[in-house]
Image (cartoon, rainbow, N blue to C red):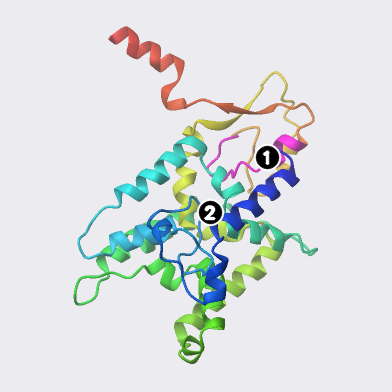
C-alpha cells in the first residue's frame, strides 16, 4: 500500500474515532452508548470528539475498580485484533501515530533512539497499566488510572488541553499535575520532530500489547528467499529500526509498508497465515488423532 493511501486511512480513522464534533460545540464529553466500546487504537476517552473509549484507559478502570476484576472483554478484543493484524493498528489507525509522523516531516536533522529504549513500554504496561491501578488504592479500595493520570501525552493533547481551553473552572484549577503532563507532551512533540514515533517506540502500552502478536498474527510479511538479494534497502527504509529481510515480523514493525515500496526485487509480500497453526503442526495433530 502506497504512502498516500496509508496517510488517507490514518486521516479517516482519526476523523471517525473523534467524530463527535458536537462535543467541541457543547464543551463536553460524549457519554452515549458507543462509549461502552473501545476503539482499536489509543484515543483519549476525555477528548470532546471521542465517540468510544480508549482500551488502555478501560483496562485501568476495570483493574482499579476495587473488585480486582480482570478485564476479559477488553483484553479479548485486543487479543483478537492482535492475532489478526499485529501492530497494523499502530501503522494505520492510531491518531497520535499520525500526529507524530506529521511532526517528523518537519525538516531537521534526525536521529534514532537506542534499541534498548523499546523495552520501556513493556515496563509501563506492567507497572502503570496493570499493577498500580490494582495495588495503589484509596481508602475505599479504588485505584487510579495511573498511566492516563501521570504519563499519557495523548490524553493531555486530545482531552486535557481542549477541556481546559473550553472550561473557565478547569483553567482556574490548573495545578502541578497538569503542568507535569504538559511537560511530557511538549517533550514528546519536540522529540517527534527529531526521531520517528518516539511515543510508539518507547512509551505506548497498547503498542506493547500488539507487538507480542506480530510474530504470530494471521496478517504478516513474508520474504521470498528466491528474490531477496539481502541489499538492506528495506532495513534502511524502516523508521522503526527493523532489519526487515531478517525478521519481517519483528515486534516493532507497524506494517507501514515502506520496506515493500523500496524493495528492488519485490521480495517482501503480504501473507495471511498463522505460525501457531502451520501445516506441519496440523499434520502432526491429525496423525495423533
Position of the N terminus, as image quadrant, is: top right
In the image, is residue 157 above or below residue 93? Answer: below
Magenta stretch in the rendered image: 248-261
Examine the structure image and report whether residue 253 is included in the region drawn in magenta: yes
> Tag 2: Cα neighbours inside 10 Å, few (<14), some, or many (≥20)?
many
Residue depicted at x 46% and y 56%: 205
- x, y (%) of residue 84? 48, 35
Residue depicted at x 62% and y 33%: 246
- x, y (%) of residue 171? 51, 88
Q: Is residue 123 visible?
A: no
Q: Is residue 263 visible?
A: yes
Where, by quadrant of the figure, is residue 280 drawn?
top left
- Foreground disc of the pair 2, 1: 1
Name which of mark 2 and mark 1 comes first in the sequence. Answer: 2
- x, y (%) of residue 186? 61, 74
In the image, is residue 243 above or below residue 14? Answer: above
Question: Which of the numbered marks, if any, corresponds to residue 285?
Answer: none
In the image, is residue 251 above or below residue 44? Answer: above
Considering the numbered disc 1 on the image, is that residue within a helix, a strand or a loop?
loop
Considering the numbered disc 2 on the image, is that residue within a helix, a strand or a loop?
helix
> Circle 1 sits on which residue?
257
Where, by quadrant of the figure, is residue 53 drawn?
bottom left
Position of the C terminus, as image quadrant, is: top left
- 166 with respect to 277 (left or right): right
Amino acid at each position: 500500500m502506497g504512502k498516500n493511501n496509508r496517510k488517507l486511512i490514518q486521516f479517516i480513522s482519526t476523523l471517525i474515532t473523534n467524530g463527535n464534533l458536537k462535543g467541541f460545540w457543547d464543551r463536553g464529553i460524549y457519554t452515549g452508548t458507543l462509549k461502552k466500546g473501545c476503539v482499536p487504537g489509543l484515543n483519549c476517552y476525555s477528548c470532546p470528539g471521542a465517540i468510544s473509549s480508549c482500551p488502555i484507559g478501560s483496562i485501568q478502570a476495570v483493574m482499579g475498580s476495587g473488585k480486582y476484576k480482570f478485564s476479559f472483554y477488553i483484553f479479548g478484543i485486543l487479543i483478537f485484533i492482535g492475532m489478526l493484524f499485529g501492530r497494523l493498528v499502530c501503522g494505520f489507525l492510531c491518531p497520535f501515530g499520525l500526529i507524530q509522523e506529521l511532526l517528523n516531516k518537519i525538516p531537521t536533522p534526525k536521529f534514532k533512539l537506542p534499541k534498548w529504549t523499546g523495552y520501556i513500554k513493556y515496563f509501563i504496561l506492567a507497572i502503570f497499566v496493570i499493577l498500580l491501578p490494582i495495588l495503589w488504592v484509596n481508602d475505599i479500595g479504588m485505584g487510579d488510572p495511573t498511566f492516563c493520570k501521570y504519563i499519557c501525552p495523548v490524553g493531555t493533547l486530545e482531552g486535557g488541553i481542549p477541556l481546559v481551553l473550553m472550561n473557565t473552572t478547569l483553567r482556574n484549577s490548573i495545578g502541578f499535575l497538569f503542568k507535569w503532563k504538559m511537560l511530557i507532551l511538549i517533550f514528546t512533540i519536540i522529540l517527534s520532530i527529531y526521531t520517528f514515533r518516539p511515543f510508539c517506540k518507547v512509551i505506548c502500552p497498547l503498542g506493547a500489547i500488539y507487538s507480542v502478536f506480530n510474530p504470530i498474527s494471521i496478517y504478516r510479511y513474508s520474504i521470498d528467499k528466491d528474490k531477496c538479494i539481502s541489499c538492506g534497502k528495506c532495513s534502511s527504509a524502516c523508521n522503526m529500526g527493523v532489519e526487515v529481510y531478517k525478521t519481517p515480523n519483528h515486534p516493532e514493525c507497524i506494517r507501514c509498508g515502506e520496506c515493500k515500496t523500496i524493495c528492488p526485487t519485490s521480495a517482501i509480500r503480504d501473507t495471511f497465515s498463522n505460525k501457531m497453526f502451520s501445516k506441519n503442526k496440523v499434520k502432526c495433530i491429525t496423525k495423533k488423532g
